[in-house]
Amino acid sequence: MSSDETTPKPPRRLRARGAPATATGGHDVEETWRQTVRGLVVPLERALTLAALRAACARLAEVAERQQLALVEEPLFGLRGDPGEDPPDRWDYEAVLPVRGAARPEGDVKVARVEGGLHLAAITPRGIDDLKSLYGHLLGKVLPSRKQRLARPYILHRVHGLTGRQEREPDEAVAIAVYVPAVLSIKPVPVPADEAEG
């Protein structure tokens, strides 16, 4: 190669804006639509563990069976709070069992409406310990790059294999799907102060 020839540049990596989000931050992200459903819900401890989640979901299943409710989908758990704005000590978790039928409250088990609509879905194979990182990725990078924002401070999760094998090693990671409700957000372009005065 002569000194006049340019050195070939490596191909540029796609930016998140306008590019498919399937390889951003190591997490596959896709848009999905969820149906609005009714669900049995019960609060969970702030220190979320797989064992506590499994016990809460088993309890909700017993209530559903006793009330002869049809199960709509696998158990979920919800985060009440905005991880982009609220510190973790203000987050509240609850177990959610989507059902169909004449559900009624029973003790601390309540009946709630689980909102549907557009959600951004991603899966982490690294379990509960990776959720904060995934929230940061979805709320800090993916939503702004798609000109979207969090529609409401309620994020749904599904633990893969939660209702299957009962015994897991304490440090065994599980795959968790996260569903972030999103809405299009067209915010006005900020005008610098000196231009606004002129």
Image (tube, rainbow, N blue to C red):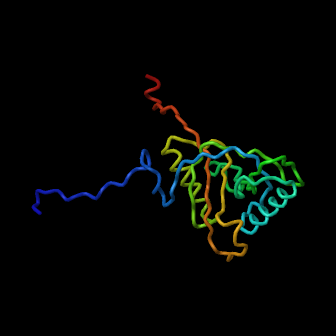
Among all residues in the image, which is located at the extreme bottom? 169
Position of 86 relative to 193 (above/below)? below
Quadrant assignment for the N terminus: bottom left
Residue positioned 52% across, 51% down in the render:
30
Quadrant assignment for the C terminus: top left
Residue positioned 76% across, 46% down in the render:
38
Among all residues in the image, which is located at the extreme right? 107
**In which quadrant of the rendered view does residue 170 lie?**
bottom right
Position of 119 relative to 174 (above/below)? above
Among all residues in the image, which is located at the extreme top? 198
Q: Nearer the viewer, residue 30 or 5?
A: 30
In the picture, measured across the screen, residue 173 lies left or right of residue 14, that is: right
**In which quadrant of the rendered view does residue 148 lie?**
top right
Q: Position of residue 181 (x, y in %)?
A: 62, 45
Position of 169 relative to 122 (above/below)? below
**In which quadrant of the rendered view does residue 173 lie?**
bottom right
Residue positioned 51% across, 49% down in the render:
142
Q: Position of residue 49 (x, y in %)?
A: 72, 66
Total marks drawn?
A: 0
Residue positioned 66% across, 51% down in the render:
155
Q: Position of residue 193 (x, y in %)?
A: 47, 30
Position of 102 relative to 6 (above/below)? above
Q: Position of residue 146 (x, y in %)?
A: 49, 43
